[in-house]
Image: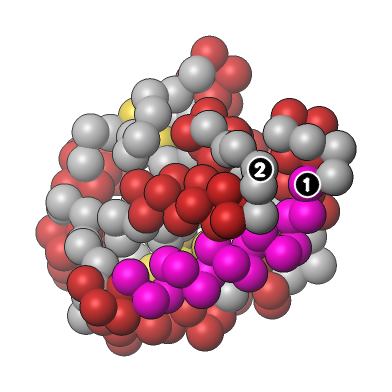
Amino acid sequence: MKINGLIFDMDGLMVDTEKLLTRFWREAAAFYGWEMTQQHVLGIRSLAGKYAGPKLQAEVSPDFDYAKVRLKRIELMNAYIAENGIEKKPGLDELIAYGREKGLRLAVATATDNVRTKLYLESIGVYHFFDKVVCGNMVKSSKPDPDIYLTASAELGLPPAQCIALEDSPNGIKSAKSAGCVPVFVPDLSQPDPETASLMFACCKTLADVIDVVEDLNR
């Protein structure tokens, strides 16, 4: 089936925030006396809070307060970004330009809330290029459930099978696959694990390399 849409995750895919999320999740947890490792943070990438909270209670501490630590993480990270800005991921401009040239519909599907999504994407100058933006607080159940990709493809007026879903996290790939999109992994902090590799359609080094995947599918 021809690809007519591209649906982008945000953190770690378009903006280089995953390294900041790792740093500030760990700092926020330490502020309240809990020790989070990088693996703990990687495990909750793009994971809905209703799943992330119990997961961290099982892995970090039974009394781990996800909501409280998350608020502190947002506070610390917002202060850092206000002072230092955020970086754009390689290949983003090239892929957006290609998509617009070819008449593809473009959407965002991110677990991040709509206020910070707009702030981040405006700060790197790409927010206005997207036809639709769907955020974690706009759907009933966020990643790894399929809702966000089903919503994004419906907002674009396309069947999920006509949309490539671009992700850097296992939870995002699960969400995209279960929605019926074409999941493409673009690694950020980690390469795909065996389960993710079994679910994804392709793995691209940068966003610019996704152009070849679209070209191949649309031949």
Q: In this view, does 81 lie to the left or right of 139?
A: left
Which residue was labeled with disc 2?
Answer: 34
Mark with earlier residue (1, 2)? 2
Magenta stretch: residue 58 in it?
no
Q: Give the range drawn in magenta.
A: 64-80
Rendered image quadrant of residue 58? top right
Q: Mark 1 Cα within 10 Å, few/some/many (few <14, many 20+)?
A: many
76 magenta-colored: yes
Q: Which residue is more in the foreground, 212 or 128? A: 128
Residue 55 drawn above or below residue 125: above
Q: Residue at (63%, 62%) from the top-left corner?
A: 70
* Residue 123, percent from left and from top: 26, 80
Q: What residue type is labelled 1?
A: Phe
Q: Can residue 170 be seen in this view?
A: no
Q: Main secondary structure of the magenta part?
A: helix
Please say if 162 is above or below 138: above
* Quadrant assignment for the C terminus: top left
Give the image location of residue 194, x and y in percent: 53, 13
Tell me whether circle 1 and circle 2 mark residues in contact (CB < 8 Å). Answer: yes
Foreground of the two, 157 or 58: 58
Which residue is pictured at 53% across the width and 32% down the height?
37
Give the CA separation, mark 1 to mark 2: 7 Å
The residue carrying pointer 2 sits among few (fewer than 14), some (14 to 19) or many (20 or more) residues within 10 Å by Cα, namely some
Secondary structure beneath disc 2? Answer: loop
Hey, what amino acid is under mark 2?
Trp
Q: Can residue 29 be seen in this view?
A: yes
Judging by the rendered image, the residue that carries numbered circle 1 is 64
1 above or below 138?
above
What is the x, y in percent for residue 214?
Answer: 29, 45
